[in-house]
Amino acid sequence: MSHAKPALEQIFDDYVQPLALTLQRCSADRYAFTVRRFLTYLHAAFPQVRRLSQLRRDPHLLGWFRMLCEERPPLCNTTRARLLIELRRLFRDMAANGHIIQPDLIRREDIPPRLRYLPRALSPEDDRLLIEELERTGDLHANALLLIRATGMRIGECIHLGLDCLRQLGTDEWALHVPIGKLYTERLVPADAAVRRIVDRILKLRVSAPPRQLARSEAFLLPRWGLRHPLYKALADDVADAANRAGCSCRVSPHQLRHTYATDMIRLGISLPALMQLLGHKDIHMTMRYVLVTQQDLQREFHMARQNAADRHITPQLLLPRTPSSATSDLPGIRQALSATRHLMEMYRRQLGDETSRRKLQRLDKRLRSVADELDLLTTPQE
C-alpha cells in the first residue's frame, strides 16, 4: 500500500513551524505569510503544480516576481526583497533535507536593491511647535514623548524604561538607563536638568494612574494595561494628534522625534562615535545617515547665503549732497560728485541680469575713473 505524498502546504508548514523555536514570533509569522502568498499565486496561476519537483524558475518563480511588481498599491523594494529572501531560505532548507527541487529558483540578482531612506527629522519650526504643544498638554503620554525627543530613544525603549531608570553617576552627573532594545543593546544616555525634570513629572503623574495599571507595571516607568502594544499605539496616536493641534506641516510619528534628536545633535557639533553611542547603533553607517540630512541643510543654507550675498555685503553708502545748493564748484566738490556717480552706477550694475548692459556700465565707470585721475593731476590756485 503506497502512502500519499504530502501536499505543498504540508511540506512548507513542516519547515515554517520549527522557525518559531529560533526566531521571534513576528518573524516566524512573516515566513508563514510569505508561504501563503506564494502558494495562493501558484495554485491560481499553475494549478497543475502539486509537487516541489515540478517547480521551475521559468515560468513559476518569474511569474510570481512579475505579479509582485504589478501589485496595486505597489510593494516597496524592502517588502519584495523580504518575500524573496524568506522563500529562498525555505527552498534551500528543503533541498538540504533531501527534497527534489530545482537549484537557483531564486537568484541573488532577483532580490530588488534596498532603497536608501534618509531619516525624516522635523523642521526646526515643526519641532518647536510640537514641543510647545506637548508641554501645554502636560499629561503622562505627552511627557513620555518629550522624553523621547530629549534623549533620542526608540519608542519601544521608552515603553520598557524601568522605574529606576534615572541613575546618578557622580556629582551632578546623571544618566538615563535605556534597557535592551531593538538591537539587543543597553546604554546610558546623559540626563541634563531638562531630562530629569521630565522624568520627575512622569513619576508624579504615574501615581494618578488606575491601580490596576500600576499593579501590572510595578517595574516600569510608564503604566500599561498588560502588553506593550496598546501603549505603543496610544503614544503614536497622541503625538500625531499633538502635531495636528500644533499646526505642524506633516504628520508626525514617535520615531521622528528620535530622528530630530539625532539631527539636532549633529548640528550642535557632536562627534559621530559619540552619537552612535547615544543612539545605540551597532554600525557607524547607520549614524552616517544623519550627516547626509545635515548636509542637505548645509547646501540649502549655502545657496540662500549666496542669493542674499549682494544684499548683505553692499558697499557703504556714500554721503551725497542732499540739496543742489550744497554742491560746490571746486575740485573737491567735483571729485565728490564723480565718486557718488560711480557708486550709484555700480549699485545699479549689480542689479542687472543682462551681461551686455553690465559690461557697458563697466566701460563707463572706467571713463569716469580716468576723468577722476585727470582731475588729480590738475593744480589750481584754490588748492
Image (cartoon, rainbow, N blue to C red):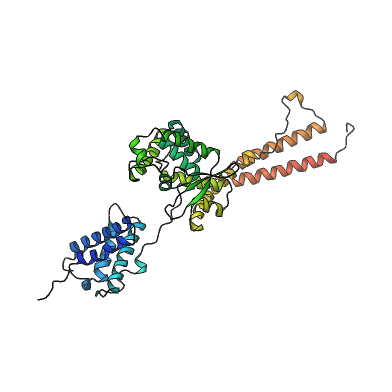
Q: In which quadrant will I find the C terminus? A: top right
User: 223 above or below 284?
Assistant: above
Rendered location of residue 175, percent (x, y): 53, 45
Q: Residue, x 24% and y 59% (percent of image)?
A: 37
Rendered location of residue 381, percent (x, y): 90, 32
User: 17 above or below 195?
Assistant: below
Q: Residue, x 57% and y 49% (percent of image)?
A: 270
Which picture quadrant has residue 207? top left
Rendered location of residue 343, percent (x, y): 70, 37
Rendered location of residue 77, percent (x, y): 36, 58
In the image shown, does 215 or 322 lie closer to the viewer?
215
Q: Is residue 110 left or right of residue 171?
A: left
Residue at the left extreme, as displayed = 1
Q: Residue, x 34% and y 57% (percent of image)?
A: 24
Q: Residue, x 74% and y 41% (percent of image)?
A: 368
Counting the numbered discs, the total is 0
